[in-house]
Amino acid sequence: MAKPNFQFQKRKKELERKKKNEEKLLRKQTRNSVPPEDTSEEPSAGEKTE
């Protein structure tokens, strides 16, 4: 019976963990970069009111 390659398993687990953390950081960045919606009734600079 062949011995298991623990180094390969460890490396694979580390890569999965790193990928998961990167995805988590991207989600946080996109969530923080989206400005909150303006709920005021004032028209924006591009709109004209008569």
Image (cartoon, helix red, strand yellow):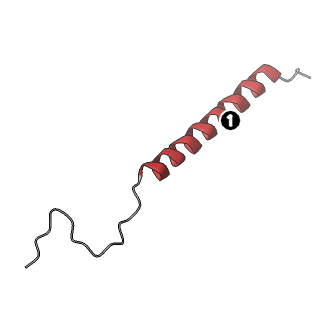
Q: Residue furthest left?
A: 50
Camera-side residue: 28 or 12?
28
Secondary structure under the numbered disc 1 in the rendered image: helix
Residue 43 % position (x, y): 21, 71
Residue at horizontal 15 percent and vertical 63 percent from the top: 46
Relative to 38, say whether 30 is above or below.
above
Asked whether the viewer can see residue 12, the reply is yes
Residue at horizontal 77 percent and vertical 26 percent from the top: 10
Relative to 10, say whether 17 is above or below.
below
Q: Residues within 10 Å of mark 1 (few under 14, many from 20)?
A: few
Residue 1 % position (x, y): 92, 23
Q: How many marks?
A: 1
Identify residue type, mark 1: Arg
Left-right relation of 47 to 24: left
Q: Residue furthest right?
A: 1
Q: Looking at the rendering, which quadrant does residue 20 occupy?
A: top right
Camera-side residue: 7 or 37?
37
Relative to 42, say whether 10 is above or below.
above
Asked whether the viewer can see residue 5, the reply is no
Q: What residue is shown with label 1?
A: 17
Q: Residue furthest bottom?
A: 50
Q: Can you say which quadrant of the picture contains the C terminus?
A: bottom left
Camera-side residue: 25 or 43?
43
Camera-side residue: 13 or 36?
36
Residue at horizontal 55 percent and vertical 41 percent from the top: 25
Residue 31 % position (x, y): 48, 52
Residue 38 % position (x, y): 35, 66
Left-right relation of 26 to 4: left
Residue at horizontal 85 percent and vertical 24 percent from the top: 4
